[in-house]
Image (cartoon, helix red, strand yellow):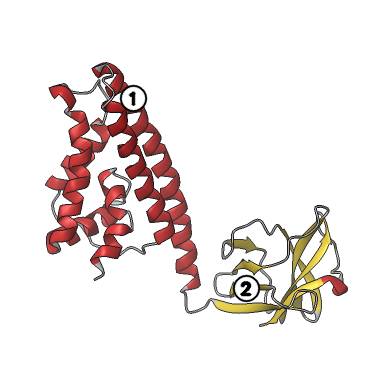
Amino acid sequence: MDIKSYIASGVLELYVLGKLSPEEAAEVERYAREYAEIRQELDATEVALQQYAMLHAQAPPPGALSGALQRIQEADKAASRPEKPIHRLRFLAYAASALLVLAIAGLLVLLNKNQSQQSAITTLEEALDALGASCDSVQANYAQAKQEMDFLGLPGTQQIVLRGTKLAPDAIATVFYNPDLHKNLLAVVQLPTPPVDKQYQLWAIVDGKPVDMGVFDVDISAFALKEAPFFENPQAFAVTLEEKGGSPTPTLDQMYVIGNT
């Protein structure tokens, strides 16, 4: 197991904040028992939050940190749970970890400026509330990305690469097509930025005829996945540049990428 990568993934921070499912939390606890480095990192993260709650030997107002600390205590006392491996998507996990580090660093600076005790505790509570909301958003994105990665890994998912035409030889896109689930996803790797009054449109070639699969913008991140309408037994997929809003038929001399199934 790559312990350093696991620690850097941010899953320990999500565990301390109570943002993992019971199965995912059980996996963290199991790794913490097996690997001393993971146990030490988990303890350090828990202590960081507990220390704020004990500032000046006075408990925070009702509600401050109670949710996070309660979840930590419950996790430490929990019996063994069903174990289930999770997929680590580093770009999302790094975001959760960075949010926690920035919040703690900012609070340390704030608490060293001789502010009143009540003001410091109130600020801490607000910061943790904001951090919790941010982690909720990260967790939602994490779950969506995990579902997409699971879809790409299915045996029935076919990868159809759409390569650039003479209009844009370096252009490339990919359609991930799964006839068993009646689902396909489009990944735009590289396409030229279109004029403001134009949009790219995806087409499926079915029984020798083009079928509209909708317009899309190239401002979606590289390798981001966009779901498109499903059609049975396509012979190919293509992307053309059309008037904004799309066209009922493709403009063939504006075809930028195409790929056969």
For the residues marked 2 and 1, what is the alpha-carbon distance in whole angstroms?
47 Å
Q: Can residue 84 be seen in this view?
A: no
Q: In this view, does 14 lie above or below 225?
A: above
State the image coordinates of residue 207 (x, y, percent, origin top left): 78, 81
What residue would you read off at disc 2? Answer: 174
**Residue at the image position 40 percent from the left and 34 percent from the top:** 130
Q: Is residue 103 above or below residue 212?
A: above
**Residue at the image position 62 percent from the left and 72 percent from the top:** 175
The answer to which image quadrant residue 118 occupies is top left
The answer to which image quadrant residue 53 occupies is top left
Q: In which quarter of the image is the C terminus?
A: bottom right
Q: Is residue 68 visible?
A: yes
SS category of the residue bearing label 2: strand
The one of 242 and 26 positioned closer to us in this rendering: 242
The one of 49 and 216 positioned closer to us in this rendering: 49
Indicate left or right for 180 with 22 as reference.
right
Q: What residue type is labelled 1?
A: Thr
State the image coordinates of residue 257 (x, y, percent, origin top left): 73, 75
Q: In this view, does 7 lie above or below 257?
A: above
State the image coordinates of residue 244 (x, y, percent, origin top left): 82, 54
Toward the front, the furthest residue is 113
State the image coordinates of residue 111 (x, y, percent, origin top left): 27, 27
What residue would you read off at disc 1? Answer: 123
Indicate left or right for 150 with 221 as reference.
left
The one of 18 and 178 positioned closer to us in this rendering: 18
Q: In this view, does 252 lie above or below 44?
A: below
SS category of the residue bearing label 1: helix
Q: In which quarter of the image is the N terminus?
A: bottom left
